[in-house]
Amino acid sequence: MSSPPRRDDSSASRPPVTLMKLAEKRALGEPIVMVTAYDHPSAKAVEAAGVDIVLVGDSAANNVLGYPDTVPVTVEEMLMLSAAVRRGLETPLMVGDLPFGSYEASDAQAIATAHRFVKEAGCDAVKLEGGGAMAERARAIVRAGVPVMGHVGLTPQTATALGGYRAQGRTAARAKAVLGDALALQEAGCFSIVFEAIPAGVTDVIMEFMEVPVIGIGAGASTDGQVLVLHDLLAIHTGFKPKFVKEYAAIGEAMVEGVRAYAEEVRSRAFPGPQHSYGIAPEELQRLRAAVGSRRQTAA
Ligand code: KIV
């Protein structure tokens, strides 16, 4: 038995974040806050922190499922994680990330996968990576009734084709290609687009052409909002840290410290104390003794 999730009323007074609300924030110049979450407790935490958009990112692959990168994660795995996040969220817009191989082949495949994210996991919208032909997939999903968030620049699902995990758009020609992708997704009806790992100067130029909210990660400060991976901003993992990550807590260290302290107290018999133990009426204990005797006495 472990303790069940506790309820809190922290979001009770906030209205749900809608697509219209995001467009309004962009128009008013109010920064949009987006973060990833992959399970129920992290959903409760980001809900309580008051973020605007929660992405159940395919970065769950490397952050919680132990895969080396985002490529292997499956639709079934993403649906299970998304449904857990849904149960912890009330206010933010929830976006499910379509995994690699679940939308590229045809419009029919893209629509079928997007519908599963909405019907089975309760997502408000889905995200897909890339411009070009992917803009057509985005258009098909939007026409089928599911809001789509685009993603340009560094697109981890196809990082190999992009030359690895590196900033994109670092020459005029490549920057123009990123602009082309962003415009194609915007024209296809995406309600918002993520810009990942793009030089800030390039983002400044592209932003002049954008009419939907742009959420940046490693794309400078001129986007309409920012997104970070929860496990990066809380430093849940140690090891490689992309240049664009700022750590706001050291949760990984705190987790190790907590478990280490528990292990020490178990070994020294400091835990559990009387306050962690259940009581029994003395007469009941006496009856038990009378009924079963004492192994120590019997043996002696
Ligand atoms: O999966 C993810 O975490 C993402 C963000 C980096 C935007 O796509």
Image: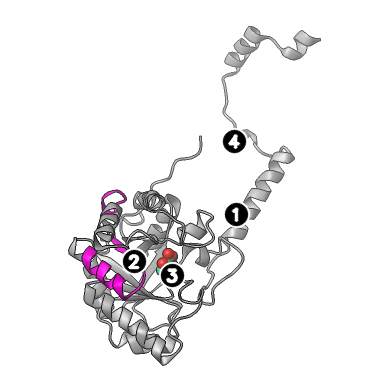
CB under 8 Å between discs 3 and 1: no
Boundaries of the magenta span: 118-141
- Indicate the position of residue 253 as horizontal and vertical percent values: 62, 59
Does residue 29 appear in the picture of this structure?
A: no
* Quarter location, residue 96: bottom left
- Is residue 280 or residue 238 the one in the foreground? 238
Q: Mark 4 points at which residue?
A: 276
Kind of residue sitting beneath label 3: Thr
Residue 259 location, x and y as percent? 64, 49
Label disc, if present, on residue 128 of the rendered structure: 2
Q: Which of marks 3 and 4 is nearer the N terminus?
A: 3
Q: Does the residue labelled 2 lie within 8 Å of ligand 1?
A: no
* CB within 8 Å, label 2 to label 4: no
Which residue is pictured at 76% across the width and 14% down the height? 296
The amino acid marked with disc number 4 is His
- Residue 41 part of the magenta segment: no
Task: Please give the name of the residue rendered at 38% of the width and 85% of the height, measured from the top-left corner.
Answer: 203
Q: Mark 1 points at which residue?
A: 255
Give the Cα distance between marks 4 and 1: 21 Å
Q: Decide which of 46, 8 is in the foreground and name it.
A: 46
Res. 1 visible in picture: yes
Residue at which label 3 appears: 158
- Please check the rendered image and state whether residue 128 is part of the magenta-colored stretch, yes or no: yes
Badge 1 element: helix
Q: How far apart are marks 2 and 1 (CA)?
A: 33 Å
Local crowd size for mark 3, using a 10 Å CA cut-off: few (<14), some (14–19), many (≥20)? some
Q: Nearer the viewer, mark 3 or mark 2?
A: 3
Residue density around tag 2, few if under 14, some if 14–19, many if 20 or more, within 10 Å: many
> Which quarter of the figure is the C terminus placed in?
top right
Q: Which amino acid does label 1 sit on?
A: Met
* Residue 205 in which image quadrant: bottom left
